[in-house]
């Protein structure tokens, strides 16, 4: 008999770069693999909300550095997250997973508006909820959007998907002596400047006692193992 999940409702944070080939564009094969991981978790009875970044298509901060108005640049980035949201929604529905896509900025012909109570109802009905356009406000990252939505939707934890199997003392791709943490407190992560999420997002999680699981989503079955409480990734608690 499969081991039951340790969490009932999670928010999965995926960077836009995770959906592209070498971090750019949208690769249908990669999106399909992400959708499969989410479907496996959803079939365990776990309610899943997803926040996707847009850095594979456009980074508003880079445009702002080159002179674009910061608010305009950030709204451009929000539109990029909507493209990723639609790609992931389609991949999930093609494998039989019910979904709802919602946006923090109005896109009525593409997806419904983000309304907290409605999103909770979708989750209770077993639908995967994919949240586009960050917080709907410039100057805030999708990490901050993930922290905010996780708090609003009363999830058990944020699952931050990366291509590294946890939090290390240094970049393990550059420093072979880097040591992996199995568990950290929020204060330890701040003191060591480990940058699990941007500081605004991290502070929001810390103030609301929102645990964060950092794990490698691109190793097959890892997300499923993580929600079952197996020794995967790093917990920040």
Image: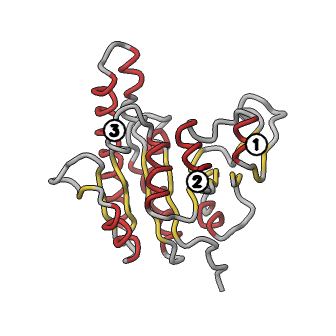
Quarter of the image where the C terminus is located: bottom right
106 is higher (above) or lower (below) than 45: above
The outermost residue toward the left is 109
Instruction: Spot the residue most to the top.
Output: 67
Q: Is residue 97 visible?
A: no
Query: Residues under labels 3 and 1: Cα distance?
Result: 30 Å
Q: Position of residue 162 (x, y in %)?
A: 59, 46
Q: Is residue 124 left or right of residue 222?
A: left
The image shows residue 7, relative to residue 131, as above or below, that is below
Residue pointed to by mark 2: 217
Question: How many residues crowd around disc 2 within 10 Å: few (fewer than 14), some, or many (20 or more)?
Answer: many
Q: Between disc 2 and disc 3, whose residue precedes?
A: 3
Instruction: Identify the residue at horizontal 66%, vertical 44% (top origin).
Output: 164
- Viewed as shown, does residue 233 lie left or right of 124? right
Could you tell me which residue is drawn at 60 percent across and 59 percent down? 220
Q: Which residue is mark 1?
A: 188
- Residue for point 63% across, 56% down: 211
Seen at 30% across and 18% down, the residue is 68
Q: Residues within 10 Å of mark 3 (few under 14, many from 20)?
A: some
Q: Which element is circle 3 on?
A: loop
| Structural distance between the alpha carbons of marks 2 and 3 | 28 Å
Q: Residues within 10 Å of mark 1 (few under 14, many from 20)?
A: few
Location of residue 213 by image quarter? bottom right
Q: Position of residue 26 (x, y in %)?
A: 38, 42
Give the percent coordinates (x, y) of residue 104.
Answer: 30, 49
- Percent across and percent down for residue 18 are 49, 43
The mark lying in front, picked from 2 and 1, is: 1
Q: Which mark is residue 129?
A: none
Q: Looking at the rendered structure, which numbered label has been put on residue 137?
A: 3
């Amino acid at each position: 008999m499969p081991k039951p999940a340790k969490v009932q409702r999670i928010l999965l944070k995926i960077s836009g770069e995770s959906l592209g080939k070498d971090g750019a564009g949208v690769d249908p094969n990669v999106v399909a693999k992400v959708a499969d991981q989410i479907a496996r978790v959803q079939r365990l009875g776990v309610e899943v909300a997803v926040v996707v970044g847009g850095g594979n298509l456009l980074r508003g901060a880079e445009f702002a550095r080159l002179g674009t108005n910061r608010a305009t640049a950030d709204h451009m980035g929000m539109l990029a997250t909507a493209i990723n949201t639609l790609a992931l929604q389609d991949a999930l529905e093609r494998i039989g997973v019910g979904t709802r896509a919602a946006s923090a900025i109005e896109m009525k012909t593409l997806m419904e508006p983000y309304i907290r109570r409605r999103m909770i109802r979708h989750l209770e009905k077993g639908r995967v909820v994919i949240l586009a356009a960050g917080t709907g406000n410039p100057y805030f990252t999708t990490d901050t959007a993930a922290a905010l939505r996780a708090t609003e939707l009363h999830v058990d934890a944020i699952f931050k998907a990366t291509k590294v199997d946890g939090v290390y003392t240094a970049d393990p791709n550059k420093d072979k002596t880097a040591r992996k943490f199995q568990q950290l407190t929020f204060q330890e992560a701040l003191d060591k400047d480990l940058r699990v999420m941007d500081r605004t997002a991290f502070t929001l999680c810390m103030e609301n006692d929102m645990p964060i699981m950092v794990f490698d989503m691109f190793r097959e079955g890892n997300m499923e193992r993580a929600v079952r409480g197996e020794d995967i990734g790093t917990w920040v608690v």
